[in-house]
Image: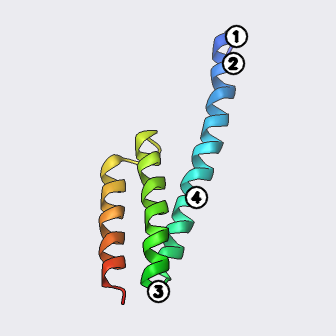
Amino acid sequence: MANHKSAIKRIRANATKRLRNRYQAKTTRNAIKKLRGMNSKAEATELYRKVSSMLDRLAKKNVIHKNKAANNKSKLAKFVSKLS
């Protein structure tokens, strides 16, 4: 167990950040699944813009790797473009 005041504070801060990161990552994953299940190109295009922004934000904060975000965006863009 941590003995220094700053270490105890760091543990609390890390726990808070971990919960926030998990929430945002899970929300993004759910949005990706929702996007993959769509059939309408207009709705999918609108949701793609939001999902793309979410992925960029997660990559910027180092919650996910920047290449993973880029790969997901690329695959989703391909999927949306194939819809009719």
Q: Residues within 10 Å of mark 1 (few under 14, many from 20)?
A: few
84 or 75: nearer the viewer? 84
In space, the residues marked 3 and 1 are separated at their CA atoms by 55 Å
Residue type for callout 1 = Lys
Q: Indicate which label's residue lies in the foreground, 3 or 4.
A: 3
| Mark closer to the chain start, 1 or 4 | 1
Please name the residue shown 35% across and 62% down the image.
73
Element at label 3: loop
Please identify the quarter of the rendering in which residue 82 is found: bottom left
Please name the residue shown 46% across and 88% down the image.
39
Question: Which residue in the structure is indicated by mark 1?
Answer: 5
Say the numbered circle drawn on residue 26: 4
| Mark closer to the chain start, 3 or 4 | 4
Q: Indicate which label's residue lies in the foreground, 3 or 2.
A: 3
In the rendered view of the protein, which quadrant contains the N terminus? Answer: top right
Residue type for callout 2 = Ile
66 or 7: nearer the viewer? 66
In space, the residues marked 1 and 4 are separated at their CA atoms by 32 Å
Q: Indicate which label's residue lies in the foreground, 1 or 4.
A: 4
Contact between labelled residues 1 and 2, with CB atoms less than 8 Å apart? yes
Element at label 1: helix
Question: Which residue in the structure is indicated by mark 3?
Answer: 40
Please name the residue shown 30% across and 61% down the image.
71
Q: Position of residue 65 (x, y in %)?
A: 37, 47
Q: Position of residue 61 (x, y in %)?
A: 46, 39
18 or 61: nearer the viewer? 61
In the image as oriented, which residue stretches furthest toward the top? 4
